[in-house]
Image (cartoon, coloured by chain):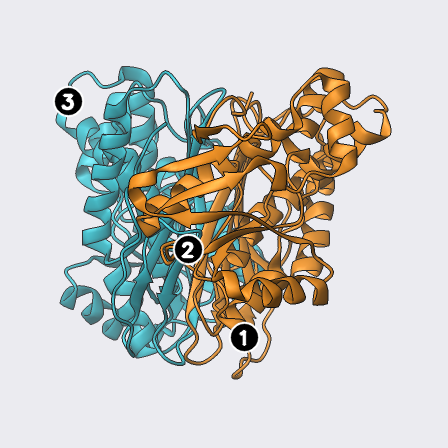
Chain colours: A cyan, B orange
């Protein structure tokens, strides 16, 4: 049996700051939340053959990504992660280096995102690796929800789009053999996403954003969710989508359309949000301060207008999720 | 894709009482813990082919059991469960009645144990059903840990032992066909365990118990854990183990030894704890008040004496886990 969590329970003092009172080793972990704070709770799972294949995903990448996708949900609410619980099922034949690699990736994420692994459960799996992580975090001064978009808002996205889906396509086609640099960059993006914790916390501090969520299933699907929750429509300009030159080169190498990858590709873990058009400069300044590109990609319309995309040829089409599902 | 969690986020007011501020539907759930309280966090998973088979486990039983095994960890710390997150992977072919049954079992557990399902994640599974639940609860006035057993303590266990393992054996042998009554009772015990939440909370209120854990892997394994954490030894009297007459009858029908089932059989979800011998009457009164049998089954010894069992023939033998693992 894989052991990620070892030994006897540790105890530390508890005060007004969040603290781990009892870590792994007893029936449940005991934690002290900050006094009066609201907590954020989220869980995400990664399943072998659905989200990843062991022939191209190193266990350390899986540990990192499992934590990153959960931390991205905390970022999208404007909070910061505090405590994690791991549930892990692995086939009996899998050697100890898998657990060691997974623990290494989780530790790196724990240091980078600021959470403590306080407990978990492991068991044998009759078929395939299943990983699920739960993160508990503390909310910021404001909750960033997806239901507050206002008519006339600009739509913004952090970072860049399209690379993760192309990275997955490259890994599926070529596996872990050395890839040309553009494909390698995309594969890295797919395997090692960076949740936008600092930017989410800054948004929660300023109150600039009306509606926020993270791009886990692609702009087309996630913008649809934001619009449904906010009861509005939206229009995205394809030529404004932030696509890196290396992502466009990767798309050419794979004979794929970079705009389609940017619109429909999932697992980007960027923040998609809306704010008043007159706040565009302040939004840009926030990104600059945190070293993160922020791009206006469209605007919020009345609900009756639906959700559409204006193509690079100027033609408008309904924006519906398509074609970039998991394998 | 299975949908257990539906619709748009719900919002409720938050005060000094624990509250769900935003339930399922946004990037993360938002909850308000009771002011100043310590929280308990635990996660457990159930894997098809390891913990259950679909040919004999109804989805509603799985939903109940998933919640019960987690709630048992909260009970063993003396707390009460507040919020749950579900992670679920199911094969694409599995019909909607599976999700409906699972949700039904979870709802029944949620009402019975007093928690709210606030979020989750579902995905397809390439092979088999995987369920993992995380419970967050509030700690009682005292934490019930496993490391406080004192030399000379009596060892107590709630309820009765042996039935769950025999129930699993019956289900494995006969499947879901109508079983003779003793086997049916054991199967019910295996599929529908009752976490000892009221008794755990009462123990946390009184301070009677020195060390507490729940019997998830069998007395032999779990008493060993309690002794290791407390740095003591122990002696169990086989003839004192609480075994129901129907459990003994089931053992005969299955040609198994009921004492071995009571010592080594897992998934009982009773509380195993130690207290001073002079408190035996108060412990018994607590059980009587809550309608729960509590039995003294042995005593705590110096660490050098190890963990042993005195058989019905009066012979002492080391008590090591054996023979009642998962299939």
Is residue B261 positioned above or below A114 on the image? above
Q: Disc 1 vs disc 2: Cβ atoms closer than 8 Å?
A: no
Mark 2 to mark 3 CA distance (whole Å): 69 Å
Tell me if mark 1 has few (under 14), some (14-19) or many (20+) residues whose alpha carbon lies within 10 angstroms of its own.
some
Q: Which residue is mark 2?
A: B152
Image location (x, y in percent) of residue A120: 39, 45
Could you tell me how many numbered marks the image carries?
3
The quarter of the displayed image where residue B304 is located: top left
Q: Chain of mark 1?
A: B
Q: Secondary structure at mark 2?
A: loop
The one of A284 and B74 positioned closer to us in this rendering:
B74
For numbered disc 1, what is the local secondary structure? loop
Q: Residue at x 18, y 35 (%)?
A: A246
Chain of the residue under label 2: B
Residue under the point 25% across and 38% down: A103
Residue on which disc 1 sits: B18
Above/below status of B218 relative to B19: above
Labels 2 & 3 near each other (Cβ < 8 A): no
Observer able to see residue A302: no
């Amino acid at each position: 049996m894989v052991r990620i969590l070892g030994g006897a329970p540790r105890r530390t003092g508890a005060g007004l700051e969040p603290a781990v009172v009892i870590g792994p080793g007893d029936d449940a972990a005991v934690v002290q939340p900050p006094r009066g704070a609201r907590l954020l709770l989220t869980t995400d799972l990664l399943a072998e053959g659905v989200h990843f294949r062991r022939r191209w995903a190193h266990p350390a990448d899986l540990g990192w990504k499992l934590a990153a996708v959960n931390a991205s949900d905390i970022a999208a609410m404007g909070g910061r992660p505090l405590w994690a619980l791991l549930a892990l099922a692995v086939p009996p034949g899998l050697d100890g280096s898998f657990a060691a690699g997974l623990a290494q990736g989780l530790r790196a994420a724990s240091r980078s995102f600021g959470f403590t692994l306080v407990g978990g459960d492991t068991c044998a799996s009759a078929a395939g690796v299943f990983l699920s992580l739960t993160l508990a975090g503390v909310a910021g001064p404001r909750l960033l929800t997806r239901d507050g978009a206002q008519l006339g808002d600009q739509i913004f996205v952090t970072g860049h789009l399209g690379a993760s889906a192309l990275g997955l396509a490259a890994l599926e086609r070529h596996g872990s053999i050395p890839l040309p640099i553009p494909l390698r960059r995309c594969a890295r993006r797919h395997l090692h996403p960076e949740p936008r914790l600092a930017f989410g916390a800054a948004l929660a501090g300023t109150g600039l954003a009306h509606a926020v969520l993270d791009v886990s299933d692609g702009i087309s699907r996630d913008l649809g969710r934001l619009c449904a929750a906010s009861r509005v429509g939206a229009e995205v300009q394809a030529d404004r989508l932030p696509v890196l030159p290396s992502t466009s080169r990767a798309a050419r190498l794979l004979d794929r359309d970079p705009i389609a990858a940017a619109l429909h590709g999932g697992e980007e873990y960027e923040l998609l949000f809306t704010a008043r058009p007159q706040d565009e400069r302040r939004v840009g300044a926030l990104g600059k301060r945190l070293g993160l590109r922020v791009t206006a990609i469209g605007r919020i319309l009345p609900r009756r207008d639906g959700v559409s995309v204006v193509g690079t040829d100027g033609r408008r089409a309904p924006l519906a999720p398509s074609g970039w599902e998991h394998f």
